[in-house]
Amino acid sequence: MRLSRALPMAAALLLAGCVLIDLSSFSVSTHPAVPNEIIESADALWAQFSEPVERSVVEPFLSVTAGGESVQGDLSWEKNRLIFRPVEPFARGVRHVLQLQGTVHTAAGRTFNELIIVPFYVGTDAQPPIIEETTPREGAVVGKADSLILTFSDPMDPDAFKDAFSVSPTTEHRVSWNSNGTQVTIVPVTRWSAESLCTWSVATACKSTTGVAVGRAWSGTFLVQQEATSPTVVSTGPAAVTGATVLPLPGGLSSLIYGDSLLITFSEDVDSISLDTAFSLSPSMEGTMRRVASGIFVFVPSDGWTMGQEYVLSITTDLKDTFGNPLCAPYRELFTPAIPAQAVTEISLMGDLVDAPSYNASQLNNSAPSVINWVLSASVPDSALVLSLTVRFAQGYDAVHQPAIANALHFEGYYPDVVSPQVTQENWMDSRTLRISFTGFTRSANHPSLERLFYRLTLPSGPDQTMNQEGSFLMESVTLLLESGSDS
């Protein structure tokens, strides 16, 4: 066989050695195909090879990042195409990078070193959020415990902000947001480094709640210097404390009721240990002082406030702020808690009586006796006489305090030597109304005509006897003097 033309020397040598080398080209195409292309947030990315490759070797070479952070995704194959599907949609407005780097092995045994880098963006019609205001302003001088406040144009994703925010020198800090998510407050856990220039930054990974990233990285500086301003007491007032929750209540200290706590707001944060030393109440009350927030403390008493008691709140100059500056002047405030006094508004009598008399507050504690006339005839023994008292209070009693009131109220034989009546039944009609029934009365008709028989109803005063769950009690004892009537 004759060849129509001479073979090149290299080809001839290869043929002579019976070795065939594949010199065909190898290529990799991607989606997105060109740098800075804009895709949809749910799009899949892919790298397609011009011939079959060893899949397990190639898969680790493919990566996707956003703002320098890895993006999680699932990998799959369709023929020679390696597909990347994000676990969560790509963040809108954020610069992403698709990268394939490594030595690719084809199924035919060929190897190719590949380095493909394709930056891309995710489309959005929304404008990127911006930082509209910073406190302190750029380059301002602040104290070591001052807050950094950033105000954004849109509600922001708190988790994305946390990852994107940094401050130098590195300082442990707390982050809190306002209710609509547009303002973040950064507070140092201890203090910013004194006499230093602090630099804060927000990276492009920061995004709004709708997934739109900030258009650029933001940064600023503030100078930290030692503070020399003394703290002052801004306000005092009542607060309701339930577990870890502290709810400020309206009014000043004279609005305190029995179970309230005492809230104190200072012009700046103060040292908790020095506050324990500087704070006092007179008369003294046991309790605990708790820090609610920067410059806000609450005193939680172990017991309730005393009705009608005037208290003196004192804070001495032993109080220091977090920089060691003392309270500018001793603080003193007098107050009386707003606990209403208990009162008996009415006592009514019912039972074996001709009528049913009722006595209001002005008719009680009267030295002149009221005569009660029994309706039963003289032939009926005195042991059958029943008298029921209905006592109405201005302030109510709960089930815990009701038994003490019933025990404190009693009848006694007052004059002359008369046996005291006995309780047969007691019942609370409502939280303010107590009804008690008695027997054991004696009628004057059973004694010499000149001898009159008297009984006295007594409800003693004071917190030990008559205090309710709100701290209200009788300031004065209540008495009602009764003369037992006669059938003659």
Image (cartoon, grey):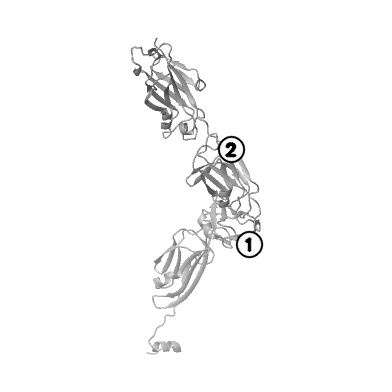
Residue 453: percent from left, percent from top: 42, 16
Q: Which disc number belongs to residue 301?
A: none
Question: Which residue is at the front of the view, 70 or 18?
Answer: 70
Q: Position of residue 202 (x, y in %)?
A: 57, 59
Q: Which residue is mark 2?
A: 335
**Number of marks in picture:** 2
Separation of residues labelled 1 and 2 (CA atoms): 45 Å
Q: Amino acid at mark 2?
A: Phe
Which quadrant of the figure contains the N terminus?
bottom left
SS state under label 1? strand
Amino acid type at image mark 1: Ser
**Residue at (47, 46) in percent of width and height:** 243
Q: Quadrant of residue 215?
A: bottom right
* Secondary structure category for the residue under label 2: strand
On residue 196, which mark appears? 1
Of labels 1 and 2, earlier in sequence is: 1
Residue 362, above or below 233:
above
| Image position of 415 with respect to 47: above or below | above
Q: Residue at x 63, y 62 (%)?
A: 196
Residue shown at the point (41%, 87%) measured from the top left = 14
